[in-house]
Amino acid sequence: MDHPAPIPTPPGNPPAAAPLRDRLTIPVLASGGILMAVMQTVVVPLLPDLPRLTGASAAAVSWMVTATLLSGAVLTPVLGRAGDMYGKRRVLSGALALMTVGSVLCALSSDIGVLIAARALQGAAASVVPLSISILRDELPPERRGSAVALMSSTVGIGAALGLPLAALVVQYADWHTMFWLTSALGALGVAATWWAVKESPVREPGRFDTLGALGLAAGLVSLLLGVSQGGTWGWAGPRVLGLFAVAVAVLALWWWQQLRAERPLVDLRLVTRPRVGLSHVAALLTGFAFYANSLVTAQLVQAPKATGYGLGLSIVATGLCLLPGGVTMLLFSPLSARISASRGPRITLALGAAVIACGYALRIADSRDLWMIILGATVVATGTTLAYSALPTLILRAVPAGQTASANGVNVLMRTIGQATSSAAVAAVLVHHSSPLGGIPVPTLHGYLLAFAMAGVVALAACAVALTIPGDAPSGGTRRARDAARDARDEALEGA
């Protein structure tokens, strides 16, 4: 079909500037991603004091983290699919609204049951990043898309780096409910800004929502992640953990069978099994594992008592400030990631990022006693994470149809979440095994921390290797046509000769 010729702009009349709402789309989406990451981390400084503040046991309090992890893992692919079907802005606004409602409930209550349920509501915000990336694909021209997607991917690390010191300051100088009132206000502002500044994407994947597939995925993921997250507490060889793993294997196997036969599946498994998509998901899992160990181990290491011989005895506020340079680095390096992906391809960016993560852990192994070396090593890991996390959605965008962008990126984020949960369990197991008593309390040894760094570095190298096996981009339509024309011209020249 012929397209109408563009009408030239009259001399002396420059093109009109984009409306304010269009110019604010990227900042509003990025702020939503940062807010989501802040919301996930603000509870961390509270955990030691929550048993006293709520009258609950430490085991019950730990569910304020576990509930968010489980609900986020389940809802991310589900809401991603709903966004592809019913409208990405609509579902994104709903996810932010659920996060805000959860924050209001936390601000209003000190009952541990209400707090756990509220944190489960906040897990819906894990879908913010894949939904936002899908909106950017639909709304932005190709020349702006790469840098915007890279920034959106980096918001997870930026928000986490900002959330810890912010929460620590509030907890230290104000009532702990104040922190949730603050995040409630920011969440309400985020919902309003999203509805005002973000256009509803016209790209849809119509059909009936796969409710059976959603329930099967939820049951399988909850069983799997509950076993992973509670294995250290309940015992890895205990009947509860082994039973959960057995249920997860059985349910996910049935779910896989059902998805292959569903007319409109929740997750297109035929798409997932393509090397470009499947290997990207494997790389996401490994990168999530490698990245998460940095935050976990750094926070514990610098807060360890000086009596250990290696600890610095820093406060929670000072610990958050140690992680802040990494967040700033992620913000600054996201444009570089987009440029590398544009010139060399996202799989090279992903491989480079994983290699940089491994180098960061090598620095941590070389010196984990001096504060400046600890900060340097953590920042190098954050830099590599920026490159890797920014490349992953670009790989997905280039490998899946436009109508499945949100659901495919949701699965990719899910794999990162599983990697992070596994990393948390593995690091905890290593540190518990390598502990020595200090004042009657078991404290991890420096050797245990170094082993955790080595484990994360090896996983980062595995992510690098997987990234290099991802097939390269197929030639674009324009490139393919140019090659065909060149081949035809060569053939004609040969025939003439």
Image (spheres, helix red, strand yellow):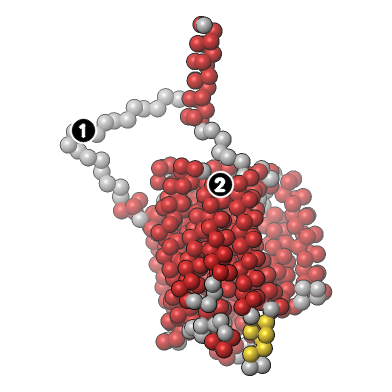
Residue beneath the point at 78% across and 54% down = 254
Q: Which mark is residue 10?
A: 1
Q: Secondary structure at mark 2?
A: helix
Q: Residue at x 41, y 70 (%)?
A: 186
- The answer, for residue 184, to whether it is visible in the render is no
Q: Is residue 210 above or below residue 302?
A: above
Find disc 2 in the rendering and name its residue. 347
Please determine whether, in this image, residue 257 is positioned above or below residue 105: above
Question: Is 251 on the left-hand or right-hand side of 159?
Answer: right
- Residue situated in front as seen by the camera: 331 or 200: 331
Q: Is residue 481 visible?
A: yes
Q: Position of residue 124 (x, y in %)?
A: 56, 65
Looking at this view, is 150 or 333 the one in front? Answer: 333
- At x 30%, y 50%, the residue is 19
Where residue 420 sits, quadrant-wise, is bottom right
Mark 2 is on which residue type? Arg
Q: Depth check: give the residue in front, 469 or 306.
A: 306
Q: In the current view of this chain or complex, which residue is farthest to the front?
A: 366
Query: Horizontal and vertical percent for residue 294?
Result: 56, 68
- Between label 2 and label 1, give the one nearer the viewer: 2
